Each structure stands twice: as C-alpha cells, then as structure tokens.
Amino acid sequence: MRDIISSMPEQMLTAIQLIPHIAIKKKNFDKVLVCGMGGSGISGEILKALYPAVHIISNKDYTIPQYVAHNTLAIVISYSGNTEETLSNYALLRKKGTGMAIISSGGQLFNKEADIKVKIPGGLPPRGALGYLFTPLPFMLWKFHLIRTNPKTGMTELANFLKRKRKTIEQKAKNLSKRFIEKLPVIYANSSTYMPVARRWQCQLNENAKTLAHINIIPEMNHNEIVGLGRPEALNAAILPVFLNDPRAHKRNKARVAIMYRIIKGLFSRAIEIKPQGNNALKRIFWTIMLGDFISYYLAKATNIDPLPVKRIDYLKKELSKL
C-alpha cells in the first residue's frame, strides 16, 4: 500500500496521456452529475470543491436526481467497471438522454456507449487509484466546454509538486500517525473546499487502518455538535481532534477554529492542526490528501493491520450477489 500511495503523481502523469484526443461539439449543459462510489466517487466531491463556478452534483446512490435531463453532463466513474450502484446510474441516465462520459479500467461499464471514455490502468484497490480517477475529470469539463482553460498544465504541475514533496509528506505522516494509535479521530474541515479532503481522510482511515473516524464541517458543527463535545466523558481520552485548516477559508471560520481550541482544551488529547502546503488550491488539497493517505498506512503498520484487504466490503458484495 505504501508504494500505491506514493504512486499518485505518476498516476496523474499517466492519466493525462490517456485523455482521448477528440473534439466534442458544444452543448448547453447547465450542470454536471458525477456518479461513483467509494474510492471512485470521492473524485467527484473533489472536483466540485475545485470548480465552484460549475454546477457539479456528486451522486452516490442507485438512483439519480429527478431534475437530471438532456442538459446535464453525466460523468460515470467506476474503477472496476462493475459497481452495481454506478451501473444502475448509467441505465437511468441513458433514458434521460444526458451527455455521457465514462472513466473506468474496464468491466461492464467500459463496454457501454458514451460521448467520451477514458480507460485507466487496473489492478489497484479503488482507493489507491485516485490519481487515475481524478485526473480525467477536469479534462471532461474542458472537453465539454464547461471550463475555458486546458487543465493539462495545472495537472502536470500538481504531479511534479507531489513528486518533490512526497518524502517530506511521508515523514510528516509517519510522525503524526503515532498520535492516532488507539484514538478516534474527529476531523473538522474549516471550509466546504476541504470537506471532501476530510471525507478522504475518513475513508482511508476506515479502509487502510480499519479504524472508525468522524468528520464534520465548520461553521455548521458550531450550531450543534460543539455542544455535545466532551460527553460521554468515558470517550474523551480516546478522541483525537484534527483540524484541516484551509488557508483560504472565510475569516470568520478561522476565528471559529481559534475559539474551538479554547473550548476543547483539557477535554481531549492535544489537537492536530494541518496546514496545507502549495501555491494554489489544487496543490494544497492533494498535499493534504496524500498526507492523510500516508497517515492511514502508517497507522495500520503501527497496529499490525494489513491495509490492503477490506473483508467486510468483500463479504457484503458477496451476500448482495446472492439476492
């Protein structure tokens, strides 16, 4: 798993080369629906955070919103190509006559019709293929005329940035992972931009380290969850607060984080504050994602957990296949 996490920038550079060189006639799409589950679906949430000027909906269910119509661009993502929820989405979308893009390593999905398809390398756990799964998405927005700038330069710069920072990110994660041992991470994002990053941290801790994690967003949690912090008291010694602090967050949210530090002081273990690095939002987001990925790996290693198998997911799928 360590090598898989390390390979994210190389995945991005490879994926750039896999984008089909075809021109798509301009259509008047007014929204984008990104369908995908788990390690595939997180890509759509990240895309939404990075392109707030585009109306992007992340869809994670068997059904699709009723308002989806021919003026929607659907991007359907399944790493395996056999995710049952995503295949259900595809069937419903075809009836709606939406624009269609497919990103997959193969399977049933890749054999279906679409305006554009990107075939990415297989053989990885979906959560370990984020570089392959996310990279085509900005290109889909560009190909379908929803953004004006070709994302190739930005994605190439991101990959090279992660390659340069990889060793320092890994060392930081290795050090931080020691504080996660036998703890329940309670992860707070101080902006909507970083909520998908918190979700990624949660999912990686779940799947790689086989541990529970909780996430929420500021300011919303200041209107409810903040009152419950500290009770039941029996849990306090096991809770580890983690703040993912977007440097571009609203100034009032930054103030809220500072006040929260005063509120939780003495209740839990010393909080961890993550300060993302990079000179733009894309780099900062993926710097933080790679940090969380490595933390989940080193936490697994420290607690004698094999990060690769996800037996409960495999069992669930096996049982569903019998129905």
Image: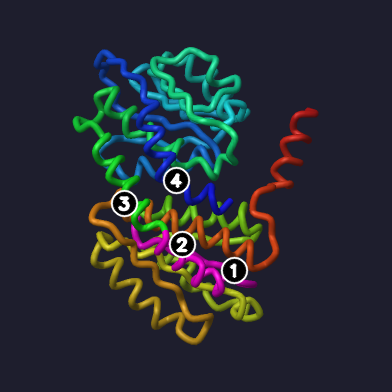
Q: Secondary structure at mark 4?
A: helix
Q: Is residue 304 visible in this depiction of the protein?
A: yes
Task: Please name the residue shown 32% across and 47% down the image.
Answer: 160
Coloration mode? rainbow
Q: Are marks 3 and 1 in contact (CB under 8 Å)?
A: no
Against 199, residue 37 (above or below) is: above
Distance, label 4 to label 1, CA atoms, is 27 Å
Q: Is residue 187 magenta?
A: yes
- Horizontal and vertical percent position of residue 143: 29, 23
Residue ID for mark 4: 8
The residue positioned farthest toward the bottom in the image shown:
266
Q: Amino acid at mark 3?
A: Phe
Neighbour tally class for label 1: few under 14, some 14-19, many 20 plus, Cα within 10 Å:
some
Q: Are marks 4 and 3 in contact (CB under 8 Å)?
A: no
Chain part drawn in magenta: 167-192
The residue shown at (48%, 12%) is 113
**Discs 4, 1 touching: Cβ within 8 Å:** no
Secondary-structure class at tag 2: helix
Q: SS class of the residue under badge 1?
A: strand
In depth, the one of 210 and 63 nearer the eye is 210
Q: Amino acid at mark 4?
A: Met
Which residue type carries mark 1? Leu
Task: Indicate which disc residue 184 carries.
Answer: 1
Which residue is labeled 2 in the image?
A: 170
Q: Residues within 10 Å of mark 4 (few under 14, many from 20)?
A: many
- Using the image as rendered, state which of residue 154 and residue 62 is in the foreground: 154
Q: Label 2 to label 3, Cα distance in Å? A: 14 Å
User: Please, is residue 80 above or below residue 28 in the view?
Assistant: below
